[in-house]
Image: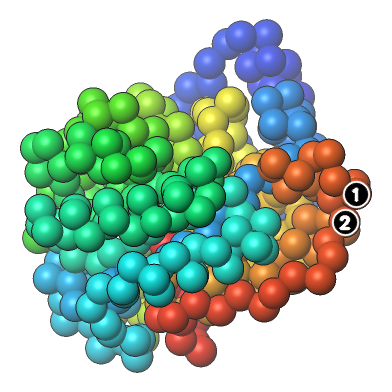
Amino acid sequence: MTTHDDLVERILAGAQADEQDALAVLRTPDEAVIDLVAAVARLRRRHFGMTVKVNYLVNLKSGLCPEDCGYCSQALGSTSEILRYTWLKEEEALAQAQAGLRGGATRVCMVASGRGPTDRDIDRVAGMVGAIKDEHPDVEVCACLGLLQEGQADRLRAAGVDAYNHNINTAQSHHDSIVTTHTYEDRVRTVARAQGAGLSACSGLIAGLGESEEQLVEALVALRELGSESIPVNFLIPFDGTPKQQTWELTPLRCLKILAAARVLAPDVEIRIAAGREMHLRSLQPLALHLANSIFLGDYLTAEGQAAQDDLALLADNGFVVLGAEGGDDGAVGERPVIRRRGAGTHVPANA
């Protein structure tokens, strides 16, 4: 009988995990999850040590989206109680980015709701990126603006954007059940356009959308084949006012198994625990970081996450070190600002 340690040894020796390996991970009995984490954590340490990459979201434009994604609080038809506003001014975006950087973030993710940017929107974001890079030339900037048209990724790259986030969200075989206003191929095409312009591809999924175990693995394998260099794993928050309200399919142990499956399929890729970690992982967040190596600091798009100090204390208490601060005081957390961002509500977090 093949054990989790056997699988990890095979991957460490250079083999690639396949769909059946990932399914076996997802089907681990609950009582064996600690053994699973202990085995798969070896892959995380091989490639990332005990570092954690800290990311910070700047919500440039909230709500007002014409797409009908059934999981999203900002989608067409959603009655979720969120803040809705048009574009932030450049100085507001810069101030919010600086708050995240003071809190320890090394990547700023600039997100705007909508189907995709106009050329004027690209110009607006380019100005914001320029302002951030002028003040903080070493910071990574990731843009997330929706479906890209020909040439737009090149303009973002020229403006100083380093990465582009566009999640496939779910398996191709499950995609049409969660959204009808764009196709799976539309999403894949945008990832390819970003890569073609030299941007690092950041593409992930949302777990808990009613997908089967096979479809979850299908999505993870697709992300590996797309060459996603950063895989955000979101856990569905069933917002009131959306078609997915009251959809509760996840447990903390289930979330650990999903992160472990992602790690065995993509052992050397940044795996980020994104929206829903506080609600679904709860007290198991530290264990999850032995599988993933990246988090968002503080808030998400349309609601509050865990306080930034609590995030940083969680890392330090469990022996993790913020990437870029490895030479610091053993990862200890000093006085940090409380980070709360415009666009955050006071109810459940939105999916990033």
Circle 1 SS class: loop
- The residue that appears at 19% across and 65% down in the rendered structure is 114
Q: Is residue 97 visible?
A: yes
Q: How is the image coloured?
A: rainbow
Considering depth in this image, is 57 or 87 the residue closer to the camera?
A: 87
User: Could you tell me residue 88's position as x and y percent?
Assistant: 31, 74
Considering depth in this image, is 38 or 128 the residue closer to the camera?
A: 128
Badge 1: residue crowd in 10 Å (few <14, some 14–19, many ≥20): few
Answer left or right for 65 relative to 343. Answer: left
Q: In the rendered structure, which amino acid carries the disc numbered 1?
A: Asp
Q: Is residue 211 visible?
A: no
Mark 1 and mark 2 residues within 8 Å of each other at the beta carbon: yes
Question: Residue placed farthest to the right in the image?
Answer: 329
Q: In the rendered structure, which amino acid carries the disc numbered 2?
A: Ala
User: Could you tell me residue 297's position as x and y percent?
Assistant: 60, 62
Answer left or right for 34 relative to 113. Answer: right
- The residue that appears at 36% across and 52% down in the rendered structure is 129
Considering depth in this image, is 343 or 275 the residue closer to the camera?
A: 343
Badge 2: residue crowd in 10 Å (few <14, some 14–19, many ≥20): some
Q: CA distance from mark 1 to mark 2?
A: 6 Å
Question: Residue placed farthest to the front in the image?
Answer: 134
Q: Is residue 32 above or below residue 20?
A: below
The residue at which mark 1 appears reads as: 329
The residue at which mark 2 appears reads as: 332
User: Could you tell me residue 268's position as x and y percent?
Assistant: 58, 26
